[in-house]
Image (spheres, rainbow, N blue to C red):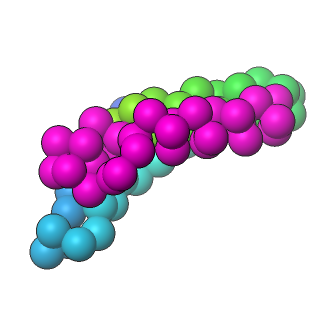
Amino acid sequence: MILKGAAGPERLRTDRERTMILDLVIPEHAWKGKSDTEVRDYFLAGIREFLDIFLSKAQEKKRLLDPQGLRTAIVKELKALH
């Protein structure tokens, strides 16, 4: 259940320590009546915030071999979308 007023990455949780789940909430005010550029920028900002949360949690649990390398690769791909 997503709380009213939620926006961006919400509710990080794990499923039996094997799967990390994080909802990316995009409220109506962020897309309704907005230009493609505004929606894209909002979405990419949410993904960047999601990435920071994910990498922090994964690093805390020692699940990634190279978290900084993964972040660099993903940010590079996000910039290609911009």
Magenta region's main secondary structure? helix
Question: Whole-percent x and y of residue 75?
Answer: 63, 33
Relative depth, front residue between 80 and 43? 80
Is 62 or 13 nearer to us in this picture?
62
Q: Is residue 41 above or below residue 23?
A: above
> Which residue corresponds to the image point at 61% horizontal and 42% vertical from the top-left?
74
Magenta stretch encompasses residue 28: no
- Taking the spot 20% from the left edge, 63% from the top edge, the residue there is 14
* Residue sitting at the far front: 65
Q: Where does the N terminus fall, quadrant-wise?
A: bottom left
- Expressed as whole percent of the image width and height from the top left, the position of residue 48 reads 53, 32
Q: Residue at x 27, y 48 (%)?
A: 58
Q: Which residues are magenta?
A: 54-82
Position of residue 60 measured from the top left corner of the image (x, y, whole percent): 17, 42
Is residue 56 within the magenta segment? Answer: yes
- Which of the two residues, 48 or 6, is positioned nearer the viewer here? 48
Q: Quadrant of residue 26?
A: top right
Q: Is residue 24 left or right of residue 2?
A: right
Side (left or right) of 31 relative to 45: right
x 35%, y 51%: residue: 65
Q: Is 44 situated left or right of 15 in this image?
A: right
